[in-house]
Amino acid sequence: MLLIEKQVKYIVAGDFGIQTQDLLAKNDIRMVLLTDCYKTVGDLIRIIKNKTCSKVSAILIT
């Protein structure tokens, strides 16, 4: 899987299917669920950085 090869740690999306959730979780790739389409890329990076100490596998950005 290309995401694993590229050592991706987070994926931001509006939704994740069940199979995708399982695959990402098994490979320790965190899912960021974006519900606020007005966030900038900078906002997303700051939110993710502030939550990296958490063991949460999914982060909800509202």
Image: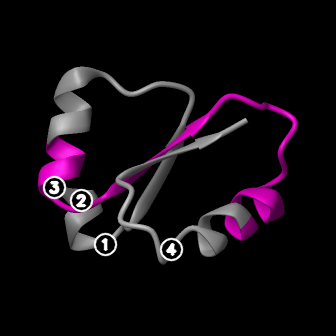
**Left of 37 or right of it: where is 47?**
left
Whole-Å distance between the Cαs marked 1 and 4?
19 Å
Disc ID at residue 52 = 4
Q: Residue at x 69, y 62 (%)?
A: 47
Mark count: 4
C-alpha distance separating marks 3 and 2: 4 Å
Earlier sequence position, callout 1 versus callout 4 = 1
Q: Residue placed at 21% from the left, 49% from the top?
A: 25
51 left or right, relative to 22: right
Query: What residue would you read off at disc 2?
Result: 2
What number is the disc on residue 30? none
Residue 2, above or below 34: below
Q: Is residue 20 left or right of residue 38?
A: left
The answer to the question of whether label 1 and label 4 lie on touching residues, with beta carbons closer than 8 A, is: no
Mark 1 and mark 3 residues within 8 Å of each other at the beta carbon? no
Amino acid tagged 1: Lys
Q: Which residues are magenta?
A: 23-46
Whole-percent x, y for residue 52 in the image? 50, 74
Of label 4 and label 2, which has the lower sequence position? 2
Graded by Cα atoms within 10 Å as few (under 14), some (14 to 19) or many (20 or more), the crowding at tag 3 reads few
